[in-house]
Amino acid sequence: MLTTSLAAPPTPLTARRRWTVLAVCALSMFLVGVDATIVNVGLPEIGRGLDVGTRGLEWVVDAYTVVMASLLIVSGALADRLGRRRVYRYGLTVFGLASLACAVAPSLGVLVAARAVQGIGASMLSPVALAIVVNAMPDPRERARAIGVWASVFGLSMAAGPVTGGALIAAFGWRSVFWMNAPVVVLALVLVALFVPESRGARARSLDLPGQALLTLALCLTVGLLIEGPRIGWTSPAALAGYALTAAATAGFVRVELRRDEPLMDLGLFRRPPFVTAVLGATAVFVALNVTLLLSTLYLQNARGWTPLAAGAATLPMALGATVCAPWSGVLVGRAGPRRPLLLAGAFTTAGGLCLVGLDGDTSVSLILLAFLLTGIGFGFANAPLTNTAVGGLPPSRAGVAGAITSTSRQVGVAVGIAVAGGLVAGAGPASLAAATRPGWLIVAACGLFLLVVARTAGTRRPNAS
């Protein structure tokens, strides 16, 4: 089993140093999260600049998220083997260089390829950051608070992306959303070198290359079918072949994992109902967020003629809701367990989606902003309890892979949300775009209702010092 096992550091870190490590890792994670959504608000501008339609633009987002999702677990295992700080620095370097390639991309194909390489770099950051943070926090209560902060920062970054993107595009054009990564990466590399200690897993584990290949194939096929299905036809021979290949890749992955002594993914974790519902809940949260972001971006810019800056500014209530409620959620998890914040997350997300099920070309701006605020509040409350539910009650040797699987499920949610939302509006003109988005808002509401189910499974167990 490949895990980000959390061996104790050679010498205990002071409290100040421990929280400095968290801050450094949070900076890098903020960059990764922002980059997952900052592109959304710029998609219409990218489409005009490179002369591509909605379906091609979906790949600009999903090339990043699919590659990142498929490599998260193996990247965590490589960090255990080679050193977490070393792999973290490799990830920052790859991410930064790929960002520069995105910034100068002359065509859609080059941009999509560069985004895929960005995903490789990002995959070396997410699970490794969590492992570094947890490794630095030996006390379970302090660790729970740190996990809450880490999840909250990542969630906040996802909500802040469109606002940042809108401002950058208005001032400097769509390529600036990639140029801005360079100084942040340089700063992060300096801070990692100064403050983050090196650590490794208790023992090196073998790499499950067959499992990795099958997982990547299954994810790519699933997202590819969701994006291209409306174009090729859901019952066309190509689609039917895709379904068969996806099923075969998934079955092959499960078969390989069950037969390996050290599998890529610990399938035994899926025997724990709280873990399963937390993983599905994390997927649902990010489906809801990305359906909201893509549909609102296309609706506001293409149907109502708003500028990227105005469309990005419209998501400020969403960012505000996430900013206020994400740290509050972490506090609630530490004090009373994950159930209460998950109930709040489900209720607010459901309300946000229901606000827009009747969207049309004349829907009031105040109702749109209210929907964004409610969705942002739900998103802010969701991340910390889902992470806590996934890793809660597990020994450190299994908590790492549990966190990595949860991170993978979030990125799967991003990819699926973009693919589903893009499929709903692909080919819709400005006059019919509002009506085309309506099923998407029902999907957002359904994701919120599912979080209420997750809350019942999560229970009220609080972190303790045992």
Image (spheres, rainbow, N blue to C red):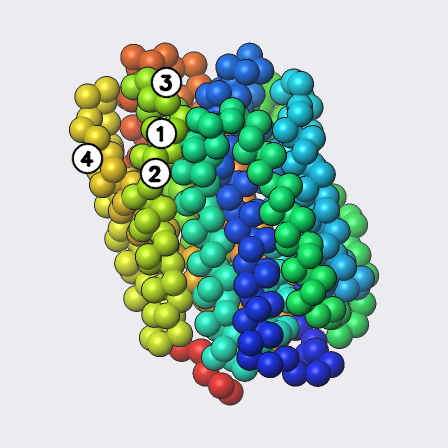
Mark 1: secondary structure: helix
Pinpoint residue 69: horizontal percent, then vertical percent: 61, 46
**Which residue appears farthest toward the bottom when viewing the image?**
466
Q: Amino acid at mark 3?
A: Asn
Q: Nearer the viewer, mark 1 or mark 3?
A: 1
Q: Decide: marks 2, 1 in contact (CB < 8 A)?
A: yes
Q: Decide: marks 2, 3 in contact (CB < 8 A)?
A: no
- Which residue shows up at 58% across the image and 74% down it? 18
Q: Earlier in the sequence, mark 2 or mark 3?
A: 3
Q: Is residue 105 visible?
A: yes
Q: Which residue, given by chain and number where applicable, does mark 2 sit on?
A: 315
Q: Which residue, given by chain and number where applicable, does mark 1 sit on?
A: 311
Q: How far apart, in angstroms, are the residues tagged by discs 1 and 3?
A: 10 Å
Q: Relative to residue 46, is residue 34 depicted above or below?
A: below
- Which residue shows up at 46% across the image and 46% down it? 158
In this orientation, which residue lies closer to the viewer: 308 or 199? 308
